[in-house]
Image (cartoon, rainbow, N blue to C red):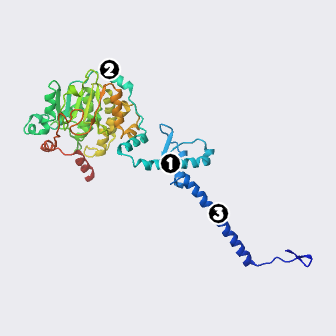
């Protein structure tokens, strides 16, 4: 080290005091750390003002989803409730991260605000987010209009085909305001009640005309033995026929296709005449009422004969049925539901509204939109209404049926119980 002493430069050995150097270094490190912390806090504060409530997880989700090939109707995608648009320019990933996180924060804030909306407003927002993109299939409407008018027939399923004309059945208020009211209001209509044996005959006839396969027929009703029983015995084991719910689900579709008319569940109340239900019989070819706009009713169907929408349903049901696992002839309760309301509504959305296999999932809470489209655009080729209560719907209204009548006494008299209980008991206990 060089110093100036007594008028001359003097070279001296460097002062080796490690404790002083250590203190100096430590002081510098502290100053640097404080400066870094202040800068970092300032930077974070600015980002929190611009992008409230965002986390590094948000950014990870956005980055991950951008690379995923997820498509939707408008080119946007959503991951974890965060909406954004995909980008194909990987070189700009870092530059647009801030914009995406900001959009994520705005989206999250909007979702928070939507929780404060009324139920109707919230449902509208949910409908938009589901992207239920449907419209009436004009080709199908044209096809429907080429069919014959709906025939004056009503099909009802019940264990006793003469229940409506027997004591004490006739004394039940429910019978008076259902099938008897239907007959009295429509004397020129043919009303047929099918018992279990008649339902099985409908299925066998369908196999004879190749609407279903012989294999499917045997799964549903078995092979008749000498006593006329549908059970089938192989190697000492009795093959049980399918549950009556499964048989009735396929039978109603077969009747709609081969005969047309109305199918009604036996627990349907009636207070309107058919001339009021179908005010333009020369125009109307099908009815699609909704149950509280949750789905299309499967317990109230009407159609012209030969409507191949029902043939589509029959064929799709066959695929599911033949592959289904069974226990004592019965499939699980969930399988019965898939063969009933789920398949029925999926096929309507695909054919009547031109949807695809995913349409049902996207539109399953949006049947209000479907019903409004039918009213506005079908010109009464299809009729519909919202079945909102036991005395307000296509076949009844509060003005003509001010009181509801329960079916429980009638069903108890015939030993009828909820099907799901016995099906679940079989599968759970075996």
- Please tell me how crowded label 1 is: few (under 14), some (14-19), or many (20+) other residues with Cα within 10 Å: some
Which of 306 and 329 lies nearest the eye of the viewer?
306
Sequence order check, earlier mark of 3 and 1: 3
Tell me, for residue 106, which label it has, or none: 1
Mark 2 lies on a secondary structure that is loop
Mark 3 lies on a secondary structure that is helix
Sequence order check, earlier mark of 1 and 2: 1
Which of 332 and 33 lies nearest the eye of the viewer?
33
The Cα–Cα distance between marks 1 and 2, rounded to whole angstroms, is 52 Å
Task: Give the left or right position of residue 371, taking residue 108 as reference.
Answer: left
Residue at the image point whose x is 71% and y is 72% from the top = 25
- Please tell me how crowded label 2 is: few (under 14), some (14-19), or many (20+) other residues with Cα within 10 Å: few
- Please tell me how crowded label 3 is: few (under 14), some (14-19), or many (20+) other residues with Cα within 10 Å: few
Tell me, for residue 36, which label it has, or none: 3
Q: Can residue 14 be seen in this view?
A: yes
Sequence order check, earlier mark of 2 and 3: 3
């Amino acid at each position: 080290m060089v110093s100036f002493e007594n008028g001359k430069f003097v070279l001296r050995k460097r002062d080796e005091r490690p404790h002083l150097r250590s203190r100096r270094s430590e002081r510098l490190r502290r100053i640097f750390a404080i400066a870094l912390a202040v800068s970092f806090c300032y930077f974070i504060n600015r980002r929190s003002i611009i992008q409230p409530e965002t986390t590094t997880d948000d950014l990870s989700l956005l980055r991950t989803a951008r690379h995923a090939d997820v498509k939707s109707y408008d080119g946007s995608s959503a991951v974890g409730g965060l909406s954004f648009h995909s980008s194909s320019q990987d070189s700009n990933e870092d530059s647009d991260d801030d914009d995406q996180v900001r959009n994520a924060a705005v989206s999250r804030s909007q979702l928070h605000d939507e929780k404060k909306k009324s139920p109707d407003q919230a449902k509208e927002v949910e409908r938009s987010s589901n992207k239920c993109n449907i419209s009436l299939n004009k080709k199908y409407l044209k096809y429907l209009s080429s069919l014959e008018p709906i025939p004056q027939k009503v099909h009802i399923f019940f264990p006793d085909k003469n229940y409506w004309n027997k004591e004490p059945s006739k004394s039940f208020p429910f019978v008076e305001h259902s099938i008897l009211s239907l007959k009295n209001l429509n004397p020129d209509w043919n009303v047929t009640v099918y018992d279990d044996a008649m339902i099985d005959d409908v299925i066998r006839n369908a196999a004879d005309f190749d609407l279903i396969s012989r294999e499917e027929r045997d799964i549903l009703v078995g092979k008749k033995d000498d006593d006329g029983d549908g059970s089938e015995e192989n190697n000492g084991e009795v093959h049980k026929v399918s549950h009556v719910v499964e048989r009735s689900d396929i039978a109603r579709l077969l009747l709609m296709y081969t005969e047309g008319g109305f199918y009604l569940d036996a627990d349907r109340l009636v207070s309107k005449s058919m001339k009021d239900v179908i005010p333009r019989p020369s125009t109307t070819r099908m009815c699609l009422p909704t149950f509280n706009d949750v789905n299309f009713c499967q317990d109230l169907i009407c159609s012209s004969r030969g409507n191949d929408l029902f043939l589509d349903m029959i064929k799709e049901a066959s695929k599911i049925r033949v592959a289904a696992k069974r226990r004592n002839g019965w499939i699980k309760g969930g399988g019965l539901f898939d063969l009933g309301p789920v398949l029925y509504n999926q096929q309507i959305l695909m054919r009547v509204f031109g949807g695809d296999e995913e349409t049902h999932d996207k539109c399953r809470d949006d049947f209000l939109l479907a019903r409004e489209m039918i009213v506005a655009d079908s010109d009464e080729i299809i009729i519909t209404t919202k079945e909102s209560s036991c005395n307000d719907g296509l076949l009844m209204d509060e003005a003509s049926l001010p009181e509801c009548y329960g079916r429980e006494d009638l069903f108890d008299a015939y030993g009828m119980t909820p099907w799901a209980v016995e099906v679940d008991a079989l599968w759970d206990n075996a």
